[in-house]
Image (spheres, rainbow, N blue to C red):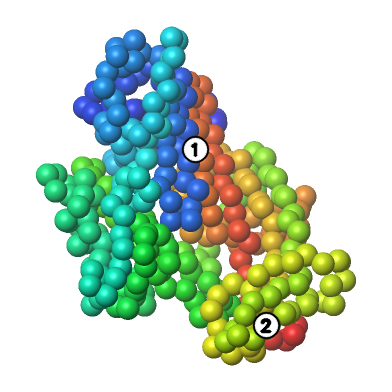
Amino acid sequence: MSSLTYSRPALFIGDKEVISFSSIQYTDSGKNQASSLNVSLSDPDLRKAALLNKEVVFYLNYGSEDTVPFFRGRIKQLNPTDFKLQFTAYDVRSLLTGRESLPLSLTDKDNYDGHTLSQFLYAYIDEYINVKETIIGLDFLNETNPTVSLSGQRTKKTDPMKLIRKSLPKNSTNLNDIKRHRLSIIDDGVKSNICFVRDQSIDSAGVLFTYSDGIKKLTVKKRESPNLLATNVDNTNVVYKHNNLATGVVAGKIEGKFDYPDEAMQEAFIQSTLAETSAEITLDTTKGHYLNIGNVVTVSTPDYPEINGKHRIVSKQVTSSVNNISCKLQLAKESPQLSEYLSSS
């Protein structure tokens, strides 16, 4: 971080500002999971305090004073020692999953038939979470596009977040400018409000990252791509071999549900073609701290010309210490257009 860049991170536990922290690490791994804040500090008074479930508010204040928190959540894990205290806080999405949530069984008697995904969330949170106070704000809760109905949904055991992940609308063709839905958070300065958002359009310009503007370090990890994919469609085994298995057999599964074997074969071709250029790309940057999961960025580097172009952010990690603030963005390369697939096939 440049010494000329303003930065004064601020951490609050309850209504008390904590100035004794040595490091703070924010992580948003995407995939519709709660973001976390890992804090290491030395404060004898806090080590004796009852901190579990206390609200934590963190202002990054990178470049200017933040008007709303960078992170708001509640302490769920503590690790005190003789010399320091470490704790982990999670945002309000953690209340919709795992041990923090009420197990759901959707049966013919008890279900959410007639509810959209948004209406289900509103009803669940209003009845089981916001009982004595507003913990999860609903002021910005919206419908997905397209709207999803929970009519007919049956399951023996699940939690709200699993039901959300299962029900979020998906592109039926998995081809053109795939925009995934996420359950996101908007902080209004008082509380964390949940809402549904879609990935930013690939037509967006995207913030430019180069070695002279933003990139401190870039790593690219190529992954082995499946070329023998299989699934079952209406009791018929469907097997797809990509490029005649020229690089040897790497088995995989054709993802999705299909009405006809031909649909599964086309999807297998798409998955295999995408995987050929798939890579784990990580940027260690001097900017982009406030970008969101799903935002589009543009990368330009002479070291890896094959990754130049537009990418979407799939995870983010921001670390603040006494003398430094760092930001790491993990990216996913955007897919070609449908016409390119059809011409190549």
Under mark 2, the amino acid is Asn
Q: Nearer the viewer, mark 1 or mark 2?
A: 2
- The quadrant in which residue 26 appears is top left
Q: Look at the image and tell me in which quarter the C terminus lies.
A: bottom right
Q: Is residue 209 above or below residue 55?
A: below
Q: Is residue 338 at all visible to an observer of this figure?
A: no
Reading the image, the residue beneath label 2 is 237
Query: Does residue 202 appear left or right of residue 91 in this picture?
Result: right
Going by the numbered disc 1, the residue's amino acid type is Val
Q: Position of residue 136 (x, y in %)?
A: 24, 49
Quadrant in the rendering for residue 223: bottom right
The residue indicated by pointer 1 is 318
Note whether residue 256 is visible.
yes
Please name the residue shown 31% across and 74% down the image: 150
In the image, taking residue 214 as reference, residue 46 lies left or right, namely left
Of residue 204 and residue 89, the one placed in the foreground of this image is: 89
